[in-house]
Image (cartoon, grey):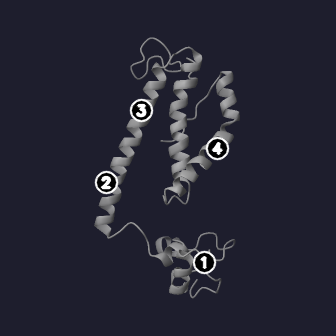
Amino acid sequence: MTAPKSKSYTAGHFELQIDGHKTTTFLKSVDGGWAKANTIDDPVGAISVHGANGLWGVLSVGLFADGTYGAGYNAVWDTAVKGLFYGGGMKQFWAQAIEAIVCIGWNVIIGGLLFKLTGLLVGGNRVTAKVEIAGLDMPEMGGLGYPEYIKHQLPEDISDAEVREIEAGEKLEPTPREPSMV
């Protein structure tokens, strides 16, 4: 899911758009903390951005829909969609909650199966520890990303001892040295 973005004309929507960054930041921090606590590897925060914020976007329609949109679409034949705070009652909120549950279920089941299948077909879903530490620029893309701003290290320049220290939490990154080939 990705948080929907659309025009809005009501004060409630306007306020949400102004506070959208605060809402996104809050949801990202809550979800990011949950992901870390549950040892979920999400280095770019995709679960927070697309999951938590998408869930909020879907559910917020059931709360803040003001009747501007919806008539004639998705089996809403004669009236526009109104959320709980605009006189629509809980009907639209429950419809949005069902949508959210179906989306989460679909993504967890299908995504999990595809992840497992990919792992079986190619022998795993992770790169080696040295490649993970050094980054995927050279091994996957064949070139260094942003070489003018970042001092890169190639996987072959990282020692096994450094990998063990990083995995044990004794060290955050490898010791900088000149790359063997650039």
Q: Residue at x 56, y 83 (%)?
A: 162
**Mark carried by residue 99:** 3
- Under circle 4, the secondary element is helix
For the question of whether residue 159 can be seen, the reply is: no
- Under circle 3, the secondary element is helix
Earlier residue among tags 2 and 1: 2
- Under circle 2, the secondary element is helix
Label 2 to label 1, Cα distance in Å?
Answer: 35 Å
Which kind of residue does numbered mark 2 sit on?
A: Leu
Q: Quadrant of residue 104?
A: top left
Whether residues under marks 3 and 1 lie with C-beta atoms below 8 angstroms apart, the answer is: no
Label 1 to label 4, Cα distance in Å?
Answer: 31 Å
Q: Is residue 37 above or below residue 14?
A: below
**Mark carried by residue 170:** 1
Q: Which residue is mark 4?
A: 26
- Under circle 1, the secondary element is loop
**Mark carried by residue 113:** 2
Which kind of residue does numbered mark 1 sit on?
A: Glu
Q: Residue at x 55, y 60 (%)?
A: 43
Q: Which of the image's four quarters has the C terminus?
A: bottom right
Label 3 to label 4, Cα distance in Å?
Answer: 23 Å
Local packing at callout 4 (Cα closer than 10 Å; few below 14, some 14-19, many 20+) is some
Which kind of residue does numbered mark 3 sit on?
A: Glu
The percent position of residue 141, horizontal first and vertical second, equals 49, 70
